[in-house]
Image: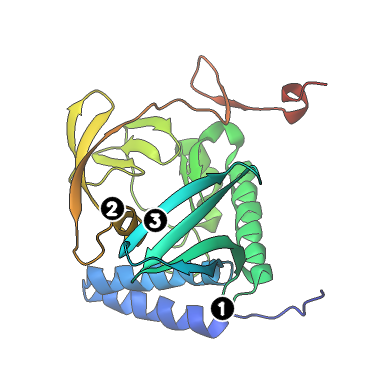
């Protein structure tokens, strides 16, 4: 299908960005953060998928449950769930309500293209780390990006913080000065050994079905061990990463 070009989110973005700036001036960090979430997450809603479940049977012996079975004849694994004695089987996924994948695909693709332009502008050797909407650069990289920096203007780069102490372990796993960010590890987690953390984790709906109990809010104590093995490139002796070449990985 063909799509016409238009500024879909101009009014939406301008409104929430203005609100965010006002909340920041009032030191209302909670409301400013909510505005940030609204700005960053809307496009993803258009790329969501929904699960398909078909009725299988009624089971008076089950109240809430979630399980998988392997069919020997069909050589296939089937996933089931039971809610109020009604058993349903998973049949796949479909495009979510009011979704349009072209929107989310266009936004995320252009974000990565813009990120690459910023990396090349800063100089690849001056960039230590990047995420979807951020860069960690050295002084030389910062100077080369100076003309793109404005702390208030929408669409410009902003300096969030500076440090002389940076340790990068993996994707979304680094310490920046006194700030430590590890994906999957909460800020309140307790480090009990090297690369090992203990924290509390909430049990979601699927987990509640699996444990046959969705009538309570359950928090359980879990222990997480980080491997910190980077598998998306070759880590060189100086800490830099050499991208993997697909043709070298494929055996013929």
In this rendering, position of residue 142 left or right of residue 221: right
Tag in front: 3 or 1 = 3
Residue wearing tag 1: 97
Q: Nearer the viewer, residue 99 or 85?
A: 85
- The crowding category of the residue bearing disc 1, from other C-alpha atoms within 10 Å (few below 14, some 14 to 19, many at least 20), is few
Q: Can you see residue 166?
A: yes
Q: Is residue 170 above or below residue 145?
A: above
Marks 1 and 2: in contact by CB < 8 Å? Answer: no
Image point (49%, 78%), residue name: 13
Q: Distance between the residues labelled 2 and 3?
A: 8 Å
At numbered mark 1, what does the secondary structure look like: helix, strand or loop? loop
- Measured as percent of width and height from the top left, residue 203 is found at 27, 55
Q: In which quarter of the image is residue 95?
A: bottom right
Residue wearing tag 3: 66
Q: Can you see residue 153?
A: no
Image point (25%, 29%), residue name: 196
């Amino acid at each position: 299908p063909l799509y016409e070009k238009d500024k879909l989110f101009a009014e939406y973005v301008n409104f929430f960005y203005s609100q965010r700036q006002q909340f920041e001036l009032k030191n209302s960090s909670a409301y400013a953060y909510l505005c940030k979430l609204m700005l960053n997450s809307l496009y993803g809603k258009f790329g969501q998928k929904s699960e398909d479940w078909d009725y299988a049977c009624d089971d008076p012996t089950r109240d809430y449950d979630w399980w998988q079975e392997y069919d020997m004849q069909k050589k296939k694994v089937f996933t089931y769930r039971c809610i109020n004695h009604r058993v349903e089987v998973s049949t796949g996924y479909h495009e979510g309500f009011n979704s349009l994948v072209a929107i989310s695909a266009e936004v995320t693709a252009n974000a990565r293209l813009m990120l690459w332009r910023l990396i090349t502008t800063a100089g690849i050797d001056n960039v230590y780390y990047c995420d979807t909407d951020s860069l960690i650069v050295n002084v030389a990289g910062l100077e080369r990006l100076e003309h793109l920096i404005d702390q208030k203007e929408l669409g410009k780069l902003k300096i969030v913080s500076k440090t002389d102490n940076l340790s990068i372990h993996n994707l979304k796993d680094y310490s920046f000065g006194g700030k430590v960010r590890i994906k999957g590890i909460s800020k309140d987690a307790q480090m009990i050994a090297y690369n090992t953390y203990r924290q509390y984790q909430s049990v979601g709906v699927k987990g509640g079905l699996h444990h046959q109990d969705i009538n309570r809010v359950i928090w359980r104590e879990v222990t997480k061990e980080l491997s910190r093995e980077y598998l998306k490139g070759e880590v060189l002796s100086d800490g830099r990463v050499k991208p993997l070449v697909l043709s070298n990985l494929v055996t013929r």
